[in-house]
Amino acid sequence: MLAFSVAGLIVGLAVGVTGVGGGSLMTPLLILLFGFAPSAAVGTDLLYAAGTKGFGTWLHGRQRTVDWRVVGLMASGSLPAATLTILWLHFVGLHPWVENMMTMTLCLAIIATAVLSLVRKRLVARMENDPDNESGLPKSLLRWREPITVGGGVLLGVLVTLSSVGAGVLGTTMLLLLYPRRAAIKIVGTDIAHAVPLTLIAGIGHLSLGTTDLPVLGMLLLGSLPGIYIGTRLSTRLPDGLLRPIISVLLLVIGSSMLFDSARSLMGS
């Protein structure tokens, strides 16, 4: 069981230093290194994320770096979507094809996370340098911003419930593009605050499916919480411009390899 705490420590350090979502690292680690079934890895990681992000939300709430209105917009889409996805999983059952679908969803989410981690700064800089109004968005898009925020929440709800990936980098990128004039720290705080109820609802849903390993969850948290704290302290001293691309490339390799293996397995069956 000590190996799970070491894994939590390593992932916590990576998250603290680079800000890359823990799900995109922890879930494939549980599958590839510890032999977890995709559903068990997702279910365990969701409650792991709820625990780690809950602490982060408390810190951001104290600093008033959470836009609770935007959290509400995202949650109005993501929480019903997560609930419906869990109900669907209960209805169809965790058959091999469902496990395979969850693996492929996880792979695509990991690849998207890696790509967005690499290009996010350029996308945001381009939008900030070419604003049509004080919001930083074209006026034609501004009036649709709130419905798009809710719709983005729906997509995140389904994606996170099936893969445990997306509440971090994908959610933050969406907010950066829709609210480019908001301070970066407030974007991060808002995304973390939204991730807590989403991962909690999805995690409880997976718990009801029997896909959560609670002893492993405890050991992961035991290692990751100090890891995140140490990584956050180190983030100001280590070259994020070097570490983030390395982790992004690693995620691309992992996601592509798992996707290839999953597709080959599907065709073989």
Image: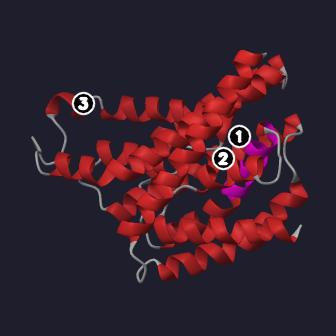
Judge left or right: residue 207 versus residue 157.
right
Question: Nearer the observer, disc 2 or disc 3?
Answer: 2
Q: Is residue 33 above or below residue 207?
A: below
Inspect the image, locate mark 2, and give the three-letter code of the amino acid beneath it.
Thr
Q: Is residue 182 above or below residue 151?
A: below
Residue 261 percent across, percent down from the top left: 68, 32
In the rendered image, which residue does mark 2 sit on? 199
Q: Looking at the image, which residue is at 40% across and 46% down?
A: 116
Residue 25: quarter of image: bottom right
Judge left or right: residue 221 versus residue 169.
right
Residue 32 percent across, percent down from the top left: 74, 48
Circles 2 and 1 in contact, beta carbons < 8 Å: yes
Inspect the image, locate mark 3, and give the three-letter code of the amino acid beneath it.
Arg
In primary-sequence order, the first of circles 2 and 3 is 3
Task: Please identify the quadrant where the N terminus is shown.
Answer: bottom right
Instruction: Confirm whether residue 211 shows in the render.
Output: yes
Using the image as rendered, state which of residue 155 and residue 190 is in the foreground: 155
Q: Which mark is residue 202?
A: 1
- Residues at marks 1 and 3, CA–CA distance in whole angstroms: 31 Å
In the rendered image, which residue does mark 3 sit on? 143
Is 135 colored magenta in this rendering?
A: no
